[in-house]
Amino acid sequence: MAESARPTSRDVARQAGVSQATVSLVLGGKWRGRVSERTAEAVRQAAGELDYRPNLAARSLRLGRTRTALLVVPALTHEYFARVYAGAARVAEENGFGVVLYPSPEGIGPARDPFGSARAAIDGVIASSMAADALAGIGDGGLPLVMLDSGPGAPDGPPTVDLAVADGIRQVVRHLLGLGHRTITHIASDVDTWTFRIRAQTVREELAGVPGVLLRTERCALDVEPARQAAVRALSAPGPRPTALLCDGDVLAAGACKAARALGLAVPHELSVSGFDDLSLALAVDPELTSVRLPAEEVGAQGMRALLALLSGRPVPPCELPVTLVARGSTAPAP
């Protein structure tokens, strides 16, 4: 379509049978409490039929906003964070926003300001798996902020969107106990963040009162080879050999399976292995991994919704999303 023929907000208003002001409210995400859901849907439908695209540059100048959010993640190579981004980007697009994806330079810890002056380039920040004070370098810490996977925050702190990590680990532990496992080694991430601290704490608490349980812990970096080495240590240590390896992630579980094969142990008949995250990797290994499915896209979507609410001055209560254990072939009754 030629530039001069592009539909305008007036065209959308005419087709929907509403005023241009109503079109602006609906497409700007500020219609709730001002127009009905039916009217809002009529505007969205008209905009879709006309393939209307608002002039975001003009709107930004008018509102003094860039309509851009920054998503800070520990790594771009992990499938979980790619899915978080997909969810955030979907909700952002629905509301006329864009999302800039930025990895923390060291994987975890403080993030630099990627713009020199973030306050001039973005409206707010969604940050995953790091403490709020680690973001002081971005916009001098003054930008609206939503934290993901960071645990419940202080009442006066930034809004939080978390996964029910403790419940997920609890489901795994009870699954293994139900299969008769009593000698269990936790292959734990050595990354010091809330999500991994709560996993270790929950494993200890769930097994503390169970008679006859022997729990050991092997910590390692979040990669296949360190996990393989940790599993070899666990399976070769003096004393009773574990019948189950409970891993903090699917990547660690893949390393544990490699260790089992190298030591001649059959999974799951001689050794059960569980993961966490339910990545594509969980279905790629043989046998397929028992894992905890995380609604990663919904984490990103809820994070973006929370940031939009924050920018609009609306209250943003803490959000915790449920997780689900998916039992597959890598776990079986204890030998």
Image: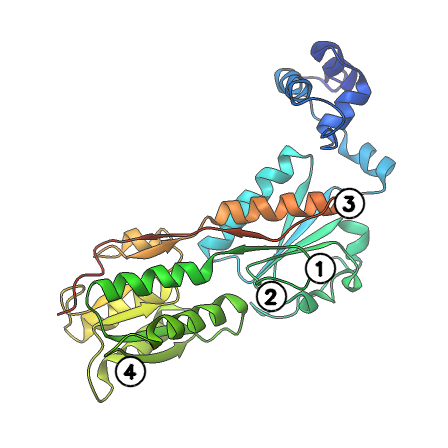
Q: Secondary structure at mark 2?
A: loop
Foreground residue among 293 and 322 = 322
Give the quadrant of residue 14.
Answer: top right
Residue 115 locus on image (x, y percent): 75, 57
Residue named by callout 3:
313
Residue named by callout 1:
114
Earlier in the chain: of badge 2 and badge 1, it is 1
Q: Is residue 218 above or below residue 108?
A: below
Give the quadrant of residue 213.
Answer: bottom left
- Which amino acid does the dot numbered 1 rest on? Pro
Residue named by callout 2:
130
Position of 104 with respect to 328 (left or right) is: right
Earlier in the chain: of badge 1 and badge 3, it is 1
- Which amino acid does the dot numbered 3 rest on? Gly
Q: Callout 2: few (<14), some (14-19), or many (20+) C-alpha neighbours within 10 Å? A: many
Alpha carbon distance from label 1 to label 3: 26 Å
Residue 187 locus on image (x, y percent): 35, 73
Identified at 23% across, 62% down, the residue is 178
Earlier in the chain: of badge 3 and badge 4, it is 4
Foreground residue among 299 and 69 = 299
Residue 109 locus on image (x, y percent): 61, 70
Alpha carbon distance from label 2 to label 4: 30 Å
Alpha carbon distance from label 2 to label 1: 17 Å
